[in-house]
Amino acid sequence: MSEINQNGIRDARKLGIPKMLLLGLQHMFAMFGATVLVPILVMGYFNNPETGEYVTAGVTVATTLFCAGVGTLIFHLCAKMKVPAFLGSSFAYLGGFATVASLNSGIYAGMAVNDKVAYACGGVVVAGLLYLVLAAVIKAVGVKKVMRFLPPVVTGPIIICIGLSLAGSAINNAQTNWLLAFVALGTIIAFNIWGKGMFRIIPILMGVVISYVLAVILNACGVTNPDGSRIIDFASVAAAPVVGLPAFQLPKFDLTAILVMAPIAIASMMEHIGDMSAISATVGENFIEEPGLHRTLMGDGLATAFAGLIGGPANTTYGENTGVLELSKVYDPRVIRLAAVYAVVLSFIPKFSAIISTMPASIIGGISFMLYGMISAIGVRNIVENKVDLTKSRNLIIAAVIFVCGLGFSGGLTFNIGGTSITLTALAIAAIAGVVLNLILPGNDYEFGVNPAGDQSRGVYVSTSDKK
């Protein structure tokens, strides 16, 4: 037993098939709460109750689960089946989806919600392809040279802006029923801080379950939201079949939507690098060296591009599953692939997806309090743990310009090129400004790998492990 605790289990088959299947189920549940929350949030951005328009294809719960499962398998193929990483929905792209949903000029004026989703997914495809560009560059020149262009003084403030730009959405959802919102938020905090064993690994899922059970009880007792509306409507659950295909949707491409979504890849690629560092530290193997960061980035990028091609949200490596690795000490990638298969199977059960989709907006708001705030907090941690010296004028200037651009250009920046209207979102402007200023201002002394603990701090997730 001591040998297992020290070195971990590299081949789960020796535990027997039943235990191996349960371990895969554990990984599936660890990613589940956060992964299914993304499509629920995204659909909330696009749905328009006033006109009766709702998302019916793409970015649904079923499509998202399918993309997570298949995306994970794509990643494992690219990473030579060596890296025990699960790919779930990325929260970093929520701001991009919200921005595309709010576009109402040019071709987007009066556009149907499903078409807007398709254009947003087109941007996700391009964002995924940017991973391949970075992977090729890293393969050619090495990771240290590339990371000098994306130091924490750039990536940290960008991640902070992603979280803060979504704060209003959390408030708007939570205020539909503050009781449920605070129960969801309090549950996540309690399990994340004081939870033991498996419960500490799945604080988001516990927040969803406990607050949803309360919502069901209140709804059964005839309690309504403050505005008089029903807390939960199960009509869609009754109408949903038990077995069916996910609602896939082909993407559409427009430069404005691409410029909304693609720059977010800068933050999500940094998240990937941080997660690879953390998984390497947890497992005790240098996955950045072998199979190589270029291969893991390629796998993440192809998984994200694949998701966009069938109407799903962007994928990313999940910190929650790294916490499970640390807890269980089972490092066999086969277990992760089992979890991926479970996710794909669930995607073909529409009634299950319909139940998930009945989650009240107030619960989503309460969970978003934590998740959106945590995104910004992770950006702060990225700056602190990498010891970014903000007494230096160059660093202060870069951070200041990123913050003002990321939070000040609320409506983006629209201009015309060759008769085509192009809109740069606040995040895109901030990312471009940060990268350019870091490139032209003297004094860039960041070197990737010198501070491994700091380099590990780039993931966007609720912390589930002391090591992380």
Image (tube, rainbow, N blue to C red):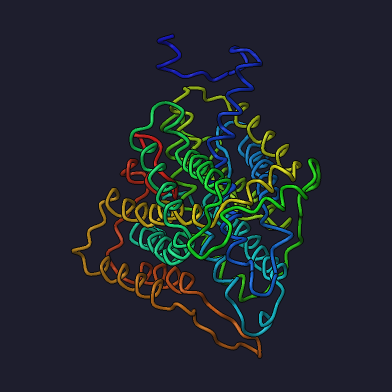
Residue lying at the far bottom in this picture: please name it.
419
Residue lying at the far front in this picture: please name it.
222
Q: Residue at x 69, y 63 (%)?
A: 55
How many numbered discs, if any? 0
Q: Quadrant of residue 46?
A: bottom right
Q: Quadrant of residue 39?
A: bottom right
Q: Is residue 284 visible?
A: no
Q: Is residue 20 above or below residue 112?
A: above
Q: Residue at x 56, y 49 (%)?
A: 219
* Residue 249 on image: x %, y %: 76, 59
Q: Nearer the viewer, residue 176 or 62?
A: 176
* Residue 131 on image: x %, y %: 57, 55
The quarter of the picture where the C terminus appears is top left
* Residue 164 on image: x %, y %: 39, 64
Q: Nearer the viewer, residue 410 or 454?
A: 410
Q: Is residue 304 visible?
A: yes
Q: Is residue 218 above or below residue 106?
A: above
Q: Nearer the viewer, residue 247 or 69?
A: 247
* Residue 72 on image: x %, y %: 63, 40
Q: Residue at x 56, y 70 (%)?
A: 260
Please state if 6 lies on the left or on the right of 138 as rendered.
left
The quarter of the picture where the N terminus appears is top left
Q: Residue at x 54, y 66 (%)?
A: 96
Residue lying at the far top in this picture: please name it.
1
